[in-house]
Image (cartoon, rainbow, N blue to C red):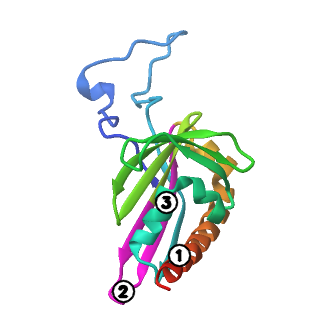
Amino acid sequence: MVVSGPPGLNRPPPERTGHRPAPLGGGAALDGRVVSAHTNSVILLIAAHATSTAPPSAFFERWAHMDSWPEWDEAVQWVRRDGPFVEGTTGTLKPKGGPKVTFVIRTLQDGREFTDRSTMLGAALTIRHLVTVGDDGRTGVDIEVSVDGPLARLWKLLIGRGIARSTPAGLHRLVAVAEADTSAGSE
């Protein structure tokens, strides 16, 4: 899935506005297409889903304790958060086999949604964690990973396959840990 960048970039060609572009070196004129370094695309790398008997709070407890992520996410070497588990808090994540990346907690609706965004050279990786409770009382857990920015397509080639492989596996291990935590707490 690819979504176009910010609105307003699709301006009418210069012929329609009465403004003519200045010639480039050599006398060639622009052809009316807007070219911008600010044009972004969002590329969905993976959307993973699982269901669980554990309540949404069990997942938020695990997500909030970021230092425990390597226990259930084999792609993560370590995570350090710079403050409380709230919107705006920053931190650093070290993926196995990759460079450290900084992140910010973009959204946090306790018991429902948590989104973090990591910055990389020329792109950003956004991971949305969502929990819902179905009619059957089971918890649905969804994780969507996307990349955007001028170098999004390059980053998709570099990390997309690994993320697509590790995200569902990590989600299923998280479900197992959350269910074990819940059953241990009820004994």
* Mark 2 secondary-structure assignment: loop
Residue matched to label 1: 181
Seen at 45% across and 18% down, the residue is 29
For residue 20, side relative to residue 120 (left or right): left
Residue 119 position in % (x across, y down): 53, 38
Q: Position of residue 41 (x, y in %)?
A: 47, 45
Q: Is residue 144 magenta?
A: yes
Residue 108 in picture, x, y percent from top left? 35, 54
* Badge 3 density bin: few <14, some 14–19, many ≥20, Cα 10 Å: some
Magenta stretch, residue numbers: 129-149
Note whether 114 is above or below 184 in the view shown. Answer: above
Query: Mark 3 — residue?
Result: 63
The image shows residue 22 at horizontal and vertical percentages of 40, 12
Extreme-right residue of the structure? 97
Query: Residue at the left extreme?
Result: 17
Task: Kindly report the distance in space between the C-alpha atoms of the residues bearing marks 1 and 3.
Answer: 13 Å
> Which disc, if any, is residue 137?
2
Left of 113 or right of it: where is 19?
A: left
- Please report contact status of discs 3 and 2: CB closer than 8 Å, yes or no: no
Nearest to viewer (mark 2 / mark 1): 1
State the residue at coordinates (44%, 42%): 83
Type of residue at label 3? Trp
The number of discs equals 3
Categorize mark 1 by other alpha carbons within 10 Å: few (<14), some (14-19), many (20+): some
Mark 3 → mark 2, Cα distance in angstroms: 21 Å
Name the residue rendered at 37%, 17% in the picture: 21
